[in-house]
Image (cartoon, grey):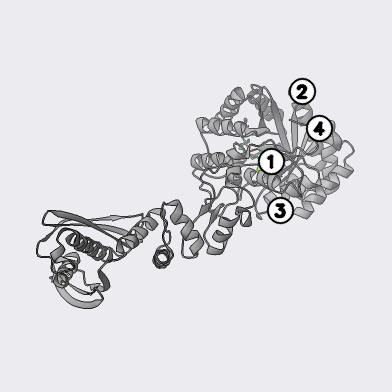
């Protein structure tokens, strides 16, 4: 830990307050993994649990303490000797350790929860901190429900705790009630009114009931607090605690406005976030700041164009700075423009001329209108389809087919353009594919061609996925493969068959000059 006046101590309570989220219980092995990652990240203080709560909590705090090297390991305890002793017995194994003891100071909590008079609470602060100090050097004291506490009484409690030996004074916004300006004033008031305040570091512990936990914490730092209590992914009681990743990245990104340092290796944030999410089963919302899956994703054409020209146009931090190695994501969808589409094609190894690019872009927009997510594989299928269709002599102009139960045979209506001439037919078949292929053969007679393969696979997942169809035709020892891709499997099938037909025509041109172009 440092005495640098601009250094903010990061106190992580994922394993204590985070575990107080209903359904977020973790076993020993999981807590050890998280603690190891927090230590690797450079977290200054790890609140590893509440040792009096259960045998399991005691064991996990002890085990984390035994393995700790650089981080201080802390345990929570009520203002009672039993809790404090149990806490000490667990954290004492760590080379650097802390006892954190708390008691409520708001009128509501004192009257109804503790059923204690304010003077008795002050006495408890004195006795509990004194006892904790008899066991360890580093004692933190918290005024539970601090933000709803009478300011004069809060000053009295803080002064008592410091006089008894507390070296960190935490002012929790236990119920997420305060707002940034009010919290700033409260910290400022303590800094100015408590006579021995310079013997302690002021700490924040903000809950997110109004979505203000991070804003309140930063406001307190600006007022003089130098420890922030927070959790990975903002896990914690009810709506959670201030999110560590948001605090750290806000301080790092806005150094111009908030000239404070933390010791966190921000490149490990994504790893820690994913680990906590996987262990607790609490998924991170896609639009969550810093660690949401969309935090560095750009879908709209104007943003994508800006990003391609200069990432700073729409990103205030780099994905690498939080450990995302797949860099910023340009997500192609119906809001994308040509710049992003062309860039994606280059990344996929395609360089198309202007006309081909425009055609492919149009088909991409049509696809994006039908399909929510357009993946790289969709684009590859689409462009391959486009490239294959250049210079085709037989083109599909219209196709419709019936299908369903209680019909003996399916009817396909088909129009093709052959060398510029429109030809139409209607054919019956045993199933829609059979009807469609018979219709093609009626217009384009291929007496010696045999269908060797008809294969369908979904390019991506979901019911709106593109179907990719492969058709293999064999004619007098020559084999061609045709491919077609579309969200409609039947349209993809017809396109694949026609693609194979066009290839056969090319092969005829090359092999038998006398048959050139005969259809
Ligand atoms: C804001 C916070 O996050 S506070 C921390 C919350 N975390 C936890 O509660 C951890 C898990 N808790 C537990 O396992 C249990 O509540 C225990 C083991 C701590 C206590 O269990 P029990 O002894 O059965 O008490 P129970 O939880 O029902 O009630 C809490 C008691 O502690 C008292 N208490 C609450 N806070 C404090 C405090 N800071 N100092 C002293 N006493 C306190 C309450 O007034 C109540 O006392 P009472 O029994 O005389 O009425
Ligand atoms: C025990 C304290 C620090 C707490 O978690 C709170 O008040 O929210
Ligand atoms: Mg809390």
Q: Quadrant of the N terminus?
A: top right
Q: Is residue 200 visible?
A: yes
How far apart are labels 4 and 1 at the CA level? 23 Å
Q: Earlier in the sequence, mark 2 or mark 3?
A: 2
Q: Quadrant of the C terminus?
A: bottom left
Mark 1 CB in 8 Å range of ligand 2?
yes
Task: Please determine whether, in this image, residue 393 is positioned above or below residue 251.
Answer: below
Q: Are marks 1 and 3 in contact (CB under 8 Å)?
A: no
The residue where tag 4 is placed is 126
**Residue shown at 45%/51% (left/top)?**
347
Q: Earlier in the sequence, mark 4 or mark 1?
A: 4
Mark nearer the viewer, 4 or 1: 1
Observer-nearest residue: 178 or 461? 461
Disc ID at residue 134: 2
Q: Which of the 4 image quarters holds residue 50?
A: top right
How far apart are labels 3 and 4 at the CA level? 27 Å
The residue where tag 1 is placed is 229
Q: Earlier in the sequence, mark 3 or mark 4?
A: 4
Q: Earlier in the sequence, mark 1 or mark 2?
A: 2
Mark 3 CB in 8 Å range of ligand 2?
no
The residue where tag 3 is placed is 177
Task: Please determine whether, in this image, residue 134 is positioned above or below residue 149.
Answer: above
How far apart are labels 2 and 4 at the CA level? 12 Å
25 on left or right of 170:
left
Tag 1 secondary structure: strand
Image spot of residue 45 (x, y percent)? 67, 33
């Amino acid at each position: 830990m440092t005495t640098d006046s601009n250094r903010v101590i990061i106190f992580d309570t994922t394993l204590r307050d985070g575990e107080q989220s209903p359904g977020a219980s973790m076993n020993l092995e999981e807590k050890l993994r998280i603690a190891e990652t927090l230590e690797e990240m450079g977290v200054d203080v790890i609140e590893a649990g509440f040792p009096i709560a259960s045998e399991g909590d005691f064991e996990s705090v002890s085990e984390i303490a035994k393995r700790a090297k650089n981080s201080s390991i802390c345990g929570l305890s009520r203002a009672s000797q039993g809790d404090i002793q149990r806490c000490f017995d667990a954290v004492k194994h760590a080379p650097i350790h802390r006892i954190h003891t708390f008691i409520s100071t708001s009128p509501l909590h004192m009257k109804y929860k503790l059923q204690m008079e304010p003077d008795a609470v002050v006495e408890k602060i004195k006795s509990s901190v004194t006892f904790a100090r008899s066991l360890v050097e580093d004692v933190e004291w918290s005024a539970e429900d601090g933000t709803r506490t009478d300011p004069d009484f809060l000053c009295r409690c803080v002064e008592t705790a410091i006089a008894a030996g507390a070296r960190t004074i935490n002012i929790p916004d236990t119920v997420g009630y305060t707002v940034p300006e009010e919290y700033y004033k409260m910290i400022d008031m303590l800094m100015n009114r408590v006579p021995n305040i310079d013997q302690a570091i002021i700490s924040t512990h903000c809950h997110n009931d109004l979505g203000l936990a991070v804003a309140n914490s930063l406001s307190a730092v600006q007022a003089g607090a130098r420890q922030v209590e927070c959790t990975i992914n903002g896990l914690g009681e009810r709506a959670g605690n201030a999110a560590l990743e948001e605090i750290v990245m806000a301080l790092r990104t806005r150094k111009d406005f908030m000239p404070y340092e933390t010791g966190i290796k921000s490149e490990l944030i994504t790893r820690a976030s994913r680990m906590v999410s996987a262990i607790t089963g609490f998924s991170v919302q896609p639009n969550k700041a810093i660690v949401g899956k969309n935090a560095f994703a750009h879908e709209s054409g104007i943003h994508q164009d800006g990003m391609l020209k200069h990432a700073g146009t729409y990103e205030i931090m780099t994905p690498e700075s939080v450990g995302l190695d797949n860099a910023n994501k340009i997500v192609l969808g119906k809001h994308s423009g040509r710049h992003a589409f062309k860039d994606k094609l280059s990344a996929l190894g395609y360089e198309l001329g202007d006309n081909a690019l425009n055609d492919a872009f149009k088909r991409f927009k049509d696809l994006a209108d039908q399909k929510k997510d357009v993946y790289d594989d969709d684009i590859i299928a689409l462009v391959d389809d486009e490239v294959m269709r250049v210079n085709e002599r037989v083109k599909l102009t219209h196709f419709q087919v019936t299908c369903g139960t209680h019909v003996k045979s399916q009817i396909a209506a088909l129009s093709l353009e052959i060398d510029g001439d429109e030809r139409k037919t209607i054919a019956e078949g045993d199933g829609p594919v059979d009807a469609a292929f018979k219709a093609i053969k009626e217009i384009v007679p291929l007496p010696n061609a045999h269908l060797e393969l008809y294969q369908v696979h979904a390019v991506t997942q979901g019911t709106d996925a593109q179907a990719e169809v492969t058709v293999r035709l064999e004619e007098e020892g020559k084999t061609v493969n045709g491919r077609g891709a579309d969200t409609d499997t039947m349209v993809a099938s017809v396109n694949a068959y026609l693609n194979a037909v066009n290839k056969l025509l090319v092969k005829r041109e090359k092999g038998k000059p006398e048959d050139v172009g005969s259809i």
